[in-house]
Image (cartoon, helix red, strand yellow):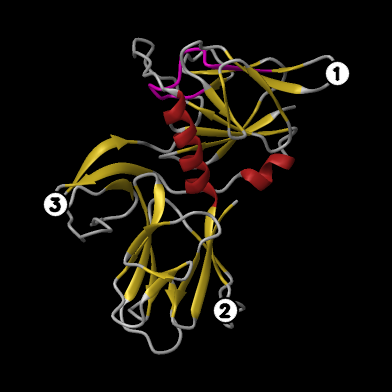
Amino acid sequence: MPTFVVHSLGSASQKVTVESSPVRIGRDPTNEIVLSDETVSREHALVIRSPDGRWQVSCVSDTNPIVVDGKLTSQGLGVVEGSEMLIGASHLLVFSENEFKADRYIHSKPTFARNRCTRCDWSGMISTLKRNTACPKCACKELTPVDTYTKGTSQAPAPRQAATAMLDPAAARHLFDALRTAKGSHLERIDAHASAAPRTALTEDKPVLLGKVANPDLCLRGLTFGEVTIAWEDSAFTVTSGMLFPALKVNGTKTKKAKLRSGDELAIGGNRFRFVTE
């Protein structure tokens, strides 16, 4: 039985197992997998198994494309174990041959909401499970909800009267990359102290603090003054330096702020880290 791991911005990742082919995906509650988002068409995609046992996903909507393993298509493409499908703007589905293999693709995450800071105009995901949340950029607590998401199942129906928001190809590709980054990034320690904390997961709703301040997520070794923050900002993880000494370097270049790409190396004195998206 095919199983889909549904990664949605704003809710915990979950598994959906479907008994047979075809598997219909869309906003309408009659679909086998229901995704409640205005950028998902009522009938958006169809996953079928051919007589030779191979699986294929096709785009039912002729206006909203899908992205399959990084390839934009409005027609159809083959899917195999671990294939990723972007449906709409907020849902990344990972295909698995059965529910047992699917366990490797699921990671529980807290409920969060997209907020905008009234002071610095920062926009990003903030956990709704925390009290007294503040802007990770300027610490302002006056945040305005933009889109609120709640933790729930993928079978929760959306209002049938809602209109579908269209995605152009460039936007679809960008959202696919952003969702992959949001759900599969971590920071690896690659210096002499790597054995103490070799890997730290990154999530959209909680900045990671590096420094010698109280309760840092990663402690910096040696003579350092200041801290470095890695946070989700504008659909990417961004590193921001508040270091007085030594300077933050990304791929050998001194910087105060930079968007991170998979494979980027961060150096703070003798502390070295690698940003990785899987």
Residue 52 disc label:
1
Mark 3 or mark 1, earlier in chain: 1
* Nearer-N-terminus badge (2/3): 3
Residue 219 on image: x %, y %: 44, 78
Determine the image quadrant of residue 257: bottom left
Q: Which residue is mark 2?
A: 191
Secondary element at image label 3: loop
Q: Give amino acid for label 1.
A: Asp
Q: Quadrant of residue 14?
A: top right
Which circle's residue, 2 or 1, is located before the other in the chain?
Answer: 1
Q: Nearer the viewer, residue 22 or 119?
A: 119
- Give how far across and how far down residue 274 sits, in percent: 54, 66
Q: Bounds of the magenta span?
A: 34-47
Give the crowd class for mark 2: few <14, some 14-19, many >=20 residues within 10 Å: some
Prevailing secondary structure of the magenta residues: loop
C-alpha separation, residue under disc 2 versus residue under disc 1: 49 Å
Report helix, strand or loop for mark 2. Answer: loop
Q: Nearer the viewer, residue 258 or 150?
A: 258
Q: Is residue 44 above or below residue 116?
A: above
Label ID, residue 119? 3
